[in-house]
Amino acid sequence: MKILFREHFHWKDRQTCPASEKNVLCLHPNNWDDYGSRSTLDATLFIEGELFLEFICKILVEGNFDTSNALKEQKHYGWDGVFPIPNLNYISVVSDIQFYSVISSKLDESEGQKVLEDLRDAGFLINVIGDDKAKLLTETSEFNSSLLRESGSNKSFEDGWKLFVENSDTGIKNFQLNLRDRQGKQLPLSFNFKTSLLPYDINVLIGPNGVGKSYCLKSLVEYWLGVESGERNKLLELKHVPFDLKPNLSRLILISYSPFEEFTIDLDGAELIDKEAYKYFGFRYKVKDRIAINRNLPATDSINSIVNALEEDAKFSSLKDWIGKFETVLGVLGNAFEFDLTAIELKAGTIKELELRRKVQVFSSPGVPAIFESRIIDKREFLIINNRNKDLVKECISRGFAVTESGIVFIKDKRIVELSSGQRLFSYIVVNVIGSIRKNSLIVIDEPELFLHPTLEIDFVSLLKKVLIAFKSKAILATHSLSVVREVPSNCVHIFREEEYGLDIIKPPFETFGGDMQRISSYVFGDKSISKPFDSWLEEQVKVIPSEQLIELLGDEINEEMIMKISRLGRNKDGR
């Protein structure tokens, strides 16, 4: 497969494969500036003549801060634009780790490795070839401030080359977050995701309200993305290093359904090229210059997410390591409740219009298969979702035919599956996460108990774990829920406490996985977990009524715990 540097092409023309090629990587000039270094090139990857992937390729040329100009000069002196570039020492990093999956799946091993050698992929040259010249270039300030500026590039550099080395682990590594408290003190917080046996796929932050759990998640998001409190200039001014090693994530997905949260909504205003490294799901959204709240966003998001899942399945299903997203949605939610079909609701009269159009298509093109399957249930119209009709689903959404506030609908035995509000919301979350997830993503969820009934919390954690395992991803939850903590090993539990000297973050000194709820509660919350109104009421009663008489008066309304409490209060009153 050739790698071509192409000048003077309009962005629309860049979508077209060069006539003489089938499999080719085309690189085009880009004037993006990374703190004085212009290393960015637009990349389009064609497989069998079809556009397969678009991403960014950053190339650092030794002794040159403007890669596009350096390559143009080479062409001026006779270079034909085909990589490798003669007479230059350079290294590259791509922004999307999917690139490595594509070339390892679509090309034989030797050809795939030659692509990385010609591109002088930094991770491959250093870790597989052992190229000393490449290693020296990675030690320059330009490499860190430009080639590794964005999170996707960091993941590619760390793990892309591993797809060409047998038995290499591309999973998320343990990392330490250096959190700054309100006084500016640095608190190290180690997230543990590597284990030999116990499930370390979820880390939990737990503690009382107002102690800083959500602030910790907000800091993690901003530091990893390099926005707001994580902006380079702010970190330099504070002399703050946010991580021991930058987390090797492919994407960060944030879920928060609190009306008071202040998480980053999107990256539209951020000085970043890759706007897809982060995905937010919540009630908030941007309207021009303000933030609005819409409680129907989870439902609307679920429809867009299922379309995204179908599109990615159609595009990437030929990759050897691809996991079918739509089938994963069906499999995971099928463990929570029974259903036969998934659907979107349509506005009245839409089915008739679609059927008429289908007859015209079949008449003009005999042999065209049915493009949709529909149902009418209780006078409501539904379009069944499957792997064959993604374009029709998209069209119904774009043309306003879909009732988006109904979200994804589940059908069983020709009836709508009735879900509780909690079940409906966590089904939307599962769809939204799977629609957005990449392998090695980090799912961050703030206080799931705000939108889940206690009986659904464990079901939700169970479903979340199935998604994480399927996509080799991890999660961090901030919670007050003891039942969630009980599902997580103690090495993955981080207790937030406000002490006299400020915030403290500790691990429990006993194993929480399958542990005793009362023991966990006592250690995490201490006296704060005891019901003060209950204690106060008993204390007041014992002051005026002897303990034995109080027990007798309560009759059938007493339990063993109350008897023990009243007896102890009575002994204390009598000085015994």
Image: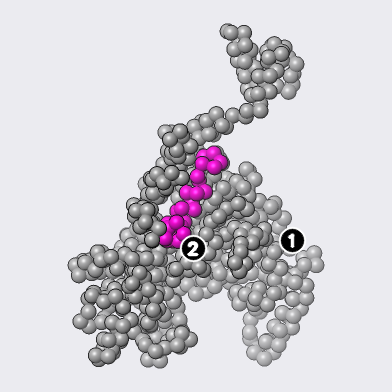
Q: Is 508 on the left or on the right of 330, as rendered?
A: left
Question: Which one is nearer the viewer's eye here, 103 or 18?
Answer: 18
Look at label 1 and name its amino acid: Arg
- Up-down relation of residue 227 to residue 203 (above or below): below
Q: Earlier in the sequence, mark 2 or mark 1?
A: 2
- Quick check: can you spot residue 165? yes
Q: Is 560 on the left or on the right of 491, as rendered?
A: right
In 3D space, how far apart are the residues under numbered discs 2 and 1 (Cα atoms)? 37 Å
Q: Residue at x 44, y 76 (%)?
A: 53
Q: Name the dominant secondary structure of the magenta segment.
A: helix
- Up-down relation of residue 70 to residue 490 (above or below): below
How many marks do you count on the picture? Answer: 2
Q: Residue at x 70, y 18 (%)?
A: 541
Percent position of residue 229, x then y: 45, 56
Find disc 1 in the rendering and name its residue: 415
Percent position of residue 184, x then y: 41, 46
Q: Residue at x 76, y 78 (%)?
A: 352
Question: Which one is nearer the viewer's eye here, 226 or 201?
Answer: 226
The quarter of the rendered structure image containing the N terminus is bottom left
Look at label 2 and name its amino acid: Tyr
Percent position of residue 204, x then y: 48, 45
Secondary structure beneath dot 1 equals strand
Return the mark for residue 278: 2
Give the magenta part as a residue range.
207-231
